[in-house]
Amino acid sequence: MKIRKYPDPVLRIKSEDINESAKSLKNVIKQMTNVMKYEEGVGLAGNQIGITKRIIIIDVNEKPTVMINPVIKDHSKEKELQYEGCLSFPNFNVIVERYKEIDGEFLNSSGVKESIHLEGLYARAFQHEIDHLNGVLIIDYASPEDRFNYNIYITKEKD
Ligand SMILES: [Zn+2]
């Protein structure tokens, strides 16, 4: 299972809500968990392995958390600037402004609804992964110059 890298068009697809039972997602969850472990990422969205459904995994501290149909319910007024990377963008970091705190909701891997309050890196990762589900990528936050340079870089990498 390979990580889809920019400019793979699947990364621009707006993912669909998941209606099937969490049980039928067992395989997807297993694949995503394995990729995360292998790549040592902080987070992963379904479309990064070609699955255009609203499922993400975040692994900030102790163990990976699977979130199905995650949504932002509320956020702090305060925002924070910080460098962000992405498994779909090797060797690329962008300063992204994100809300400092987030109240989120999602279905867990058993299909049970959970509410969470997130801060710091966890809140940042949550916002980053929800961006993925909407087809939004870190390069969209980059300056025109950085965007240009990265596009040149990946073209050269292909040769
Ligand atoms: Zn990413």
Image (cartoon, grey):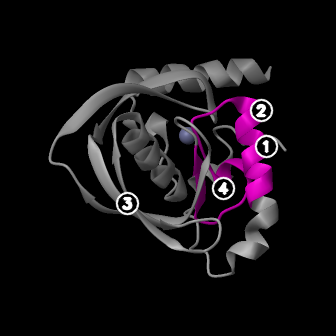
Q: Could you tell me residue 102's position as x and y percent?
A: 31, 52
Q: Is residue 82 left or right of residue 57?
A: left
- Give the answer, above or below, for where 136 lies relative to 35: below
Instruction: Characterize the local packing of mark 4: few (<14), some (14-19) or many (20 or more) Cα atoms within 10 angstroms.
Output: many
Quickly name the residue at label 2. Answer: 38
* Amino acid under disc 3: Gly
Quickly name the residue at label 1. Answer: 34
Instruction: Characterize the local packing of mark 3: few (<14), some (14-19) or many (20 or more) Cα atoms within 10 angstroms.
Output: some
Quickly name the residue at label 3. Answer: 104
* Amino acid under disc 2: Tyr
Q: Could you tell me residue 11's position as x and y percent?
A: 62, 50
Quickly name the residue at label 4. Answer: 46
Instruction: Characterize the local packing of mark 1: few (<14), some (14-19) or many (20 or more) Cα atoms within 10 angstroms.
Output: few
Residue behind label 1 places its C-beta within 8 angstroms of ligand 1? no
* Tally of numbered tags: 4
The magenta stretch is 29-58
Give the residue furthest to the left: 77
Q: Could you tell me residue 59's position as x and y percent?
A: 58, 40
Determine whether label 1 and label 2 are within 8 Å by CB.
yes
Between the C-alphas of marks 4 and 3, the distance is 18 Å
Between the C-alphas of marks 1 and 2, the distance is 6 Å
Q: Residue at x 71, y 60 (%)?
A: 51
Question: Is 37 in the magenta?
Answer: yes
Disc with the residue nearer the chain's start (3 vs 2): 2
Ligand 1 image position (quadrant): top right
* Amino acid under disc 1: Asn
